[in-house]
Image: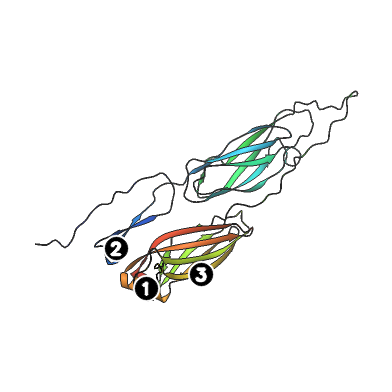
Amino acid sequence: MCESKASFTVPILDDAMDEPDETFSVELGGDESGTATGTIVDDDAPPTLSVGSPTVVEGSTAQFPVTLSAPSAFTVTASYTTVSQTASAGSDFQPESGTVTFPPGTTAQTISVPVIADGANEGDETFGLAITAPQGATVGTPQAVATIKPSAAPAGGGPDQNPPEPPVIPLRPPQIDTVPPALGVSPPVQRNGVVEWTVSCPAGEQSCSGTVTVTTLRPVTGARASIAKKRKRKPKRANLGTTSYRLDGGQSKKVRVRINKRGRKLVLRRHNLPVKATFKTKDSSGNKSTRTQNFTLHEVAFRHN
């Protein structure tokens, strides 16, 4: 008596990195007709973002250390702004706001705030740095506090002394955006021959624009591959559809790719087709980034298309 079913196990390794779901393929019989796809569902929580509280002297720069509790496979961002306390913005420190960005795998960054030397004879003063709107992480320290120590030089102003020097505001170098845009991409949704994502442009960017292209995960075998072989060219991954997108900073929108005729035929013939989506994005400063996402096209999404 022959058994019609059999099973086997594939060990999955655990890690502590927050990352997208991943897939792998198993081939049975040595050809693509016996290919199965396994999906590894990520179970790791996003890392925690924390900010340290520095102590500085008047006329220097407060360096706030910003850290993640663990590396992430995603780009992590958060907004920051300075907050007046006993020290006042504009007279004791230069007010600052912006976005701190952690590229994938990065766990440490620094936020710099210039501190003004006012020449006054006074005690310690403080101001805060508030962290809001995290993306890809949770906030463990929503606000850090910088302590400003008075300068050791005498304030002056007595009858036999020169008058105090006017306040010195450190000159800031021009800010040049060199950080690639960290496009947020949701898992794909398939229906009626269309693949749909929700994409997000970080709030710190002026705009994000680019294209998403869906291709087969591996080179396609068949008539076209035979022709390529005769011409001494390697078979290529099949292009199944592409579309463009443009978003303003902080905006989210739906992006859809309609799978072309060749793609529909491949899906219906093989029932499940491993594919790759490639998002190529450029920000308003010309910085470029590429993000890929592997998934499987399922026959059920094409039956009524």
How packed is label 1: few (under 14 Cα within 10 Å), some, or many (20 or more)? few
| Mark 2 or 3, closer to the camera | 2
Q: Quadrant for the N terminus, please.
A: bottom left
Which numbered disc flags the more N-terminal residue, 1 or 3? 1
Tell me, yes or no, whether the two marked residues, 2 and 1, touch with CB atoms within 8 Å: no
Residue 235 in which image quadrant: bottom left
Cα separation between marks 1 and 3: 32 Å
Residue 198 left/right relative to 2: right
How packed is label 3: few (under 14 Cα within 10 Å), some, or many (20 or more)? some
Tell me, yes or no, whether the two marked residues, 1 and 3, touch with CB atoms within 8 Å: no
**Residue beneath the point at 35% across and 71% down:** 267
Residue 300 percent coordinates (x, y): 34, 70
Three-letter amino acid code of the residue under disc 3? Thr
Tell me, yes or no, whether the two marked residues, 2 and 3, touch with CB atoms within 8 Å: no
The tag on residue 243 is: 3
Three-letter amino acid code of the residue under disc 2? Thr
Residue 4 in which image quadrant: bottom left
Residue 108 in which image quadrant: top right
* Circle 2 residue: 35
Q: Quadrant for the C terminus, please.
A: bottom left
**Residue beneath the point at 46% across and 59% down:** 292
- Can residue 239 be seen? yes
Residue 203 percent coordinates (x, y): 60, 55
